[in-house]
Structure formats: structure tokens, C-alpha cells
Image: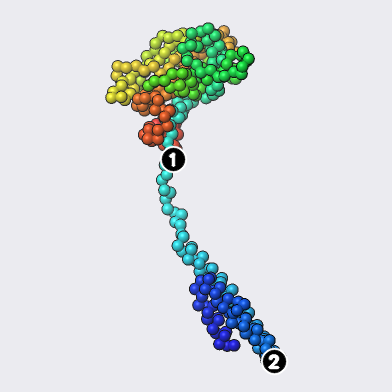
Amino acid sequence: MDDLREKWLAAVAGAGDEAALEAVRVAALGKKGEISAQMRELGRMTPEERKEAGPRLNALKDEINAAIAAKKTALADAALEERLRTEWLDVTLPARPQRMGTVHPIAQVTEEVTAIFADLGFSVAEGPQVESDWHNFDALNIPGHHPARAEMDTFYMARPEGDTRPPHVLRTHTSPVQIRSMEAAGAPLRVICPGRVYRADYDQTHTPMFHQVEGLAIDRDISMANLKWVLEEFVKAFFEVDAVELRFRASHFPFTEPSAEVDIRCSWQGGTLKVGEGDDWLEILGSGMVHPKVLAAGNIDPAAWQGFAFGMGIDRIAMLKYGIPDLRAFFESDLRWLRHYGFASLDVPTLHRGLSR
Ligand code: PHE
């Protein structure tokens, strides 16, 4: 009995892993194991012999079982220890830099424009891109027969057959947001309205979808002088220069009277556009004093209130500021182009930190 005890306790102690331990258990206590065979021998003993050997054999069986259980726990602990030793992680290491993508120049410029006009006291208004015929045209003093409708190369939405109401349009400019802002807030009013607009047109400086920002200021005695000052302040802040030359050209829009188109002095050198110098002019916006009929359409009394409005091409001023020669590249989603012209995602433009840094 003592030999058996020594032999099997040594075998348990020597098992190197769980599989070896299980083999020891089967060899000792399994159906055909040595201890089990001894248990069967009890049957052939005399009652006196059995009385003496039975409890000792049972005690040995329990002792081996307990040794196996203890060894099992020790092996599991050692395995965990080993895993913890090899699978460690240094949480104090600096983070690995990851490419997060870039901010598109149009988004960047929209943010820049918004920051500048917010500083001048303008709030931001938005309107739908699928617009009613009335908001896009009639309310802006462009009646059904007006040639401006044809000039705008409008995209029309479908109407169910038999529906004779004028179809909705993809807004051809941000000017309908003038009407919506007047309807919603009344006078006095100072808003800018950035957003997408649509016209069926496609070449180096025209795409079927592009971006405008509308400006509208209404008060008792707003004049063209205020318009000129606001635009000059804007252009200087936007291009981050002390002086930029603007040219106001008399023009015509149905919704303003008088009207002016504004060009900015620039040069094209080796395909790069530079602002503030050179012999070229690039048109960046249309503007004027809000037509009395437009004020009336927005439920504002034209006898008591007046104001200026402008509509500026966001894509145009983005091309100018960042030297982007072809408008179409904005909408091609070419990753290499975006990495070159894009902006770091966490640099939000503000006036006090510098717009584009
Ligand atoms: N809506 C005009 C355009 O898209 C621009 C404009 C806006 C002109 C406001 C005057 C006043 O061309």
C-alpha cells in the first residue's frame, strides 16, 4: 500500500500538463486503473482482511483524487501566469497615428465663410434643395414667362400624371432661402444661407451641382454702402490679406434693384489662380438692394424696410483661395486630390486662431 501511494503521488506531481495528469488519473483510478483493480481484489479477501484493507484503500483513493485536483489547479494557475507574462500590453505607449481622412475644401470654406459672417452678426439659415417653383422663382420676381427661368438651366422634379401644379425644382440658387427667412423671422434680419444649388451646365468652371452662400440684411435704412463695406470686410478676412481689389459692375437681377456683380482681381499663372494681383477679374458674386416685390413676397412691408442681398459662389472662392484650377475636381472624390487639397479634420476654422492656418 505504501509503495502504491508513493508511486501514484509521484506520478501526479510529475505530470507536466493537463493531458499528462489525465493519463495518470486513468492509469490509477480509471476502470482499468491499478487502484481500481486493487478495489476489486477486496472481494476475494476474508472479512477480517477486508476490514483492514478496505478503509486504507479508500483513503488512498481519496488522497490520490485530492492530489490530482490540487495539481489541476496548480497547472491552470501556471498556464495563466505564463499567458500574463507573454501577453502584456504597455498602456503608457503613445498612440499610433492613424489617417483620419481630410476635410473637403468646400466644407472648409463653408466653415470659414460662416465664421466670418457670424463675426459680423449674421446667423445661418437653411432651406430645402428640392424647392417649390414659387420660392425659387415667383417670390423672387421671376414670373413664369421670364427669360431668367430658361437661362438658369433648371432641373425639374416629376409630377404624377394629371397633376397640373407647377413642378418643384432643384433650387437653382440659394435666393429662395431669402424668402423662407423673411417668412420665418420677419424684419430686421441678418442671415447667410450656405448650401447646394443645381443647374444643367458642365465645363471647367461649371458643374451641375455647386455651392452658394446667400447673404441678406434687412433693416430701416440699409444701403448699398453697407453692402460694399460688408463685402470688402468679408473678402479681406476670407483671403487673409490687408487689401483686395473688388470691382462692382452694374448688372441686372429680377430680385434686386439696383444690382451689381462683383469681381475680384486675380491672375492665372501656370494654371494657378492667384488673388489680389494680375490683370484678370473673376466674378464671385451677384448682389443688390432687395426688390420691393421680394420684400412683399416675404411678408415684409417695403415701405418700412429695405435691405441688401448677395449670392456668392463658394466653389469659386475656394478655387481662388487655395489655387485649385478646375472646379470639376471638387466632385470627383479622388483620394490623392483630397489628400493634397484637404484640411486636417480637427482644425475648425475660427477668426481668432486664423481661418486656414
Ligand atoms: N441668385 C443669384 C445667382 O444665383 C445671385 C444673387 C443673389 C444676386 C442675391 C443678387 C442678390 O446668380
Residue annotated with mark 1: 100
The crowd level at tag 2 (other Cα within 10 Å; few <14, some 14-19, many 20+) is few
Q: Residue at x 68, y 86 (%)?
A: 43
Asked where in the image residue 210 lies, by quadrant, the reply is top left
SS category of the residue bearing label 2: loop
Residue annotated with mark 2: 46
Q: Is residue 322 above or below residue 221?
A: below
SS category of the residue bearing label 1: loop
Going from the N terminus, do you reach mark 1 or mark 2 first? Answer: 2
Q: Is residue 248 above or below residue 111?
A: above
Please state, as top left, top right, bottom left or bottom right, where the N terminus lies in the image. bottom right
The kind of residue tagged 1 is Met
Please state, as top left, top right, bottom left or bottom right, where the C terminus lies in the image. top left
> Furthest-right residue in view?
47
Q: CA distance from mark 1 to mark 2?
A: 85 Å
**Residue 28 locus on image (x, y percent):** 58, 79
